[in-house]
Amino acid sequence: MKLIFANLLNDGGPTFMYPTLLMLIICIALIVKAFLKGDATGKTVSLIKHISLFVLVWGFLGLFIGLIGAFDSIQMANEISSGVLAGGLKIGLLSPSFGMLTFLVARLGIIGLIFKEK
């Protein structure tokens, strides 16, 4: 499992996947901190919201940059098999998928913090 996760991080493009992983860890740490110590001012929840939205957009930026590079390669090759195209699209979707997962984890944490306040 650990090896598969590391392969997915590398396959999705380390430039986008590793910062996303770092932001996921930061969001989880901020959520845990807010649950344990509270967030009277709302700064922690606001920070989590901003980071989660940033990481979502970061993942889609990775997708678009990857697609532009893939389409350039396809244009130069003139012919490409559907298997190669499907494999490239699958790899391209790793970055936004991980960004969406991080976004959802952070937003679920925010929902939990809001329920905790009331």
Image: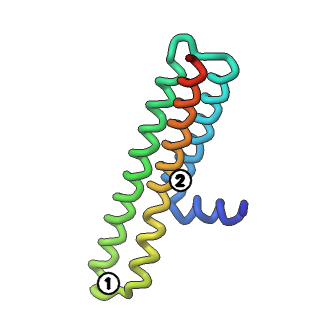
* Residue nearer the viewer, 23 or 46: 46
Residue shown at 27% from the left, 86% from the top: 78
Residue 58 as seen in the image, left or right of residue 113: left
From the viewer's perspective, is 31 left or right of 103?
right
Q: Nearer the viewer, residue 115 or 37?
A: 115
Q: Which residue is mark 1?
A: 77
Q: Quadrant of the N terminus?
A: bottom right
Q: Could you say whether the residue bearing mark 1 is in a helix, strand or loop?
A: helix
The kind of residue on which mark 1 rests is Ala
* Residue furthest front as drawn: 118
Mark 1 burial class by Cα count in 10 Å: few <14, some 14-19, many 20+: few
User: Dot 2: few (<14), some (14–19), or many (≥20) neighbours within 10 Å?
Assistant: many
At horizontal 51% and vertical 61% (from top left) the residue drawn is: 12
Question: Where's residue 112, x and y in %?
Answer: 58, 30
Image location (x, y in percent) of residue 88: 43, 73
Quadrant housing the C terminus: top right
SS state under label 2: helix
Look at the picture and state if 62 lies above or below 47.
below
> Are discs 2 and 1 less than 8 Å apart at CB?
no
Q: Which mark is residue 54?
A: none
Which picture quadrant has residue 11? bottom right
Q: Earlier in the sequence, mark 2 or mark 1?
A: 2
Determine whether 96 is above or below 28 in the image.
below
Position in image of residue 39 (x %, y %): 58, 16
Name the front one of labels 2 and 1. 2
Q: Using the image, tell me which numbered label, if any, was put on residue 17.
A: 2
Q: Provide residue 116's location: percent of width, then percent of height.
A: 60, 22
Write the residue at 48% across / 68% down: 91
Q: Is residue 79 left or right of residue 30?
A: left
Q: Amino acid at mark 2?
A: Met
